[in-house]
Image (tube, rainbow, N blue to C red):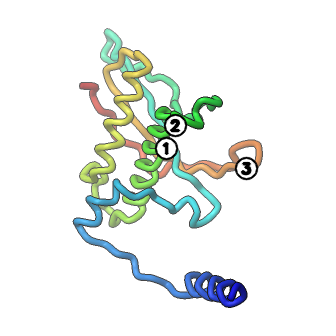
Amino acid sequence: MTEVLFVAYFLVLIASLVIKTPVIKGPWLFLLRAFFPNWKFFHAVGYVPHLYARSSVELATGELQWSDWVLIYPRRVRRLHHLLHNPDTNIGLAQQNMVDHFWADLHDLPEGDDPRALVSYQMMQRLVEQVLRAHDLNFTHSQFELRMVLDGPSETVDTHVMMTSPVEAAC
């Protein structure tokens, strides 16, 4: 009996690798996707989307003085008690999942379409402002970039900018 289950398991595994399933799309499924994680990070090894942001202060001359680009999703510090209760890492994973969905939306966006109409773009805009405000920055304008980063074992091997948002006035 065990041998039959073992063989059946490998047959199902091989069938799942060989048979290509259609991609399901639709407006209601699009709205429900927030309930499901984006598993594309298991799809292939390679470039990973990273969200960077910067802020500026308007000087008396009317020019903008920009800060350096800051990674929005830095790794969280892990502690032993996080095995039981870890809301900080959970919110970080949810935010990175939003970045992955934003990347997928940009990738699927037809050439020439404005990404500002995407719901995921607006979510990124709010996330950037929220993170910049959490750092107690007194800024008048903000901007964000989605960069595709290829990490090596010890350092970043390559990076390229997929999209840079226009400069937005702070609320």
Is the residue 96 above or below the residue 39 in the image?
A: above
Q: Is mark 3 on a helix, strand or loop?
A: loop
Q: How crowded is mark 1: few (under 14 residues within 10 Å), some or many (20 or more)?
A: some
Residue 93's label in the rendered image is: 1
Name the kind of residue labelled 1 in the image: Leu
Mark 2 = which residue? 89
Is the residue 71 above or below the residue 164 in the image?
A: above
Mark 3 = which residue? 152
**Which quadrant of the figure contains the C terminus?**
top left
Q: Which of 155 and 134 is in front in this view?
A: 134
For image coordinates 52% across by 37% down, the residue present is 89
| Left-right relation of 28 to 151 | left
For image coordinates 39% across by 76% down, the residue present is 23
Q: Which of 106 and 133 is in front in this view?
A: 133
**Image quadrant where residue 94 sits:** top left
Residue 151 in picture, x, y percent from top left: 68, 49
Q: Nearer the viewer, residue 149 or 6?
A: 6
**Which quadrant of the figure contains the N terminus?**
bottom right
For image coordinates 28% across by 49% down, the residue present is 116
